[in-house]
Image: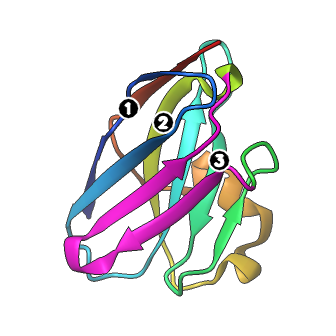
């Protein structure tokens, strides 16, 4: 098992930036596809940024060119750099892990399905005001 703890959420004005962190502990030696999801009140949880264990990435169209997912293997930490934030980015952001050796290409669109991820953090709130 792996435990995930997010941090970095905050309130910012439109156009601002934030960097979220997800610290992993436990069985971090296994292969995982890592993801950032978000969920706004009354809406379904949606995947926004994915990174497989080879470092391949994929983004939701709504955040492409504004968000960047990265990781520091030495620190067992996943990051989400969010730039040019918009009010519609307001949500609780979650880090998630799918235990798999498959690449993003092989997994296809299932990478955006929250049901495919076994491990979740508690979430961190991002609020963007206009």
Q: Is residue 69 magenta?
A: yes
Q: Is residue 95 left or right of residue 116?
A: left
Of 79 and 32, nearer the camera is: 79
Task: Write the residue at 67% across / 27% down.
Answer: 86
Of 118 and 55, nearer the camera is: 55
Quarter of the picture containing the C terminus is: top right
Q: Is residue 126 left or right of residue 25?
A: right
Q: Secondary structure at mark 1?
A: loop
Q: Residues within 10 Å of mark 2 (few under 14, many from 20)?
A: many
- Residue extent of the magenta highlight: 65-86
Q: Mark 1 = which residue?
A: 9
Q: Mark 2 = which residue?
A: 93
Distance between mark 3 and mark 2 Cα atoms: 10 Å
State whether residue 110 is above or below residue 120: below
Distance between mark 1 and mark 2 Cα atoms: 8 Å
x and y percent of residue 51 in the render? 56, 70
Q: Is residue 40 left or right of residue 106?
A: left
Quarter of the image where one finds residue 84: top right
Label placed on residue 47: 3
x and y percent of residue 93 in the render? 48, 36
Residue found farthest to the left? 26
x and y percent of residue 15 in the render? 63, 30
Of 42 and 60, nearer the camera is: 60
Q: Earlier in the sequence, mark 3 or mark 2?
A: 3
């Amino acid at each position: 098992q792996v435990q995930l703890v997010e941090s970095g959420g905050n309130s910012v004005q439109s156009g601002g930036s934030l960097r979220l962190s997800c610290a992993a502990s436990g069985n971090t030696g296994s292969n995982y596809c890592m993801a950032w999801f978000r969920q706004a009140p009354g809406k379904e949880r949606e995947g926004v940024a994915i990174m497989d264990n080879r470092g391949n990435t994929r983004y939701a169209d709504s955040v492409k060119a504004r968000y960047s997912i990265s990781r520091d293997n030495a620190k067992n930490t996943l990051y989400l750099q969010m730039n040019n934030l918009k009010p519609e980015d307001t949500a609780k952001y979650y880090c998630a892990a799918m235990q798999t050796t498959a690449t993003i290409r092989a997994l296809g669109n299932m990478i955006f399905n929250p049901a495919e991820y076994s491990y979740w953090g508690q979430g961190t709130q991002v609020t963007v005001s206009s």
